[in-house]
Image (spheres, rainbow, N blue to C red):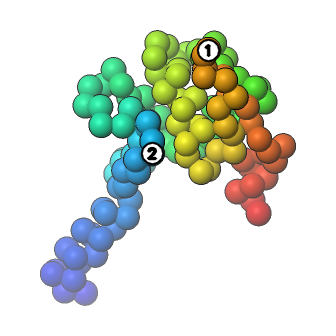
Amino acid sequence: MSRSDAAELQSALGSALTEKREFFRTAGEYREDGSYVVSRRSADSTGNAKVFESFETLQRLYSRLPDEFDADDVGRTGITGSRRHMLIRHFCEHPAFDCEIERRNPLRAKKTSTTTLVEATAD
């Protein structure tokens, strides 16, 4: 493989491995190091973001939450402040998570499927 072909491939791989996807209120970003960042859409401060080791780490967090959950439930995992609400909204907006907002004030979500993420990804 030529040097220019290798550089082109490296650039294409980098683009495939890093992706930022914006939703209505939140955004999710896959980073080159394998981490996944949930942030408020269009926010630029770290106070509006939560970094996970990987997307799978976020999926495990979701699977440990009860069928109906709120900020207190998310906070029991060690996540503090407004990031708890941001994660609830991200779970409801991201297509990989089968849940919806059940109540807006106080914010509460409900899982809409009895199939766990592990079962869904195995299929």
The answer to which of 38 and 95 lies nearer the viewer is 95
- At x 60% / y 38%, what residue is drawn? 92
Tell me, yes or no, if residue 43 can be seen here: yes
Q: Secondary structure at mark 1?
A: loop
Residue 59 numbered tag: none
Q: Are marks 1 and 2 in contact (CB under 8 Å)?
A: no
Q: In which quarter of the view is residue 74 placed?
A: top right
Question: Residue beneath label 2, please?
Answer: 23
Inter-mark Cα distance, 1 to 2: 21 Å
Q: Secondary structure at mark 2?
A: loop
Q: Amino acid at mark 2?
A: Phe
Direction from residue 25 to residue 121 in the image, left or right: right
Q: Is 9 above or below relative to 41?
A: below
- Farthest residue to the right: give it: 114
**Residue 100, image x, y percentages:** 67, 37
Residue count near mark 1 (Cα–Cα under 10 Å), binned few <14, some 14–19, many ≥20: few
The answer to which of 39 and 17 lies nearer the viewer is 39
Residue count near mark 2 (Cα–Cα under 10 Å), binned few <14, some 14–19, many ≥20: some
The answer to which of 26 and 46 lies nearer the viewer is 26
**Residue 38, image x, y percentages:** 44, 36
Image quadrant in which the C terminus is located: bottom right
The count of marks equals 2
Direction from residue 8 to residue 48 in the image, left or right: right
Give whichever of discs 1 and 2 has the lower sequence position: 2
Tell me, yes or no, if residue 35 can be seen here: no
Q: Amino acid at mark 1?
A: Pro
- At x 37% / y 64%, what residue is drawn? 16
**Residue 45, image x, y percentages:** 26, 25
- At x 24% / y 68%, what residue is drawn? 11
Q: Is 76 above or below relative to 113?
A: above
Question: Residue beneath label 1, please?
Answer: 106
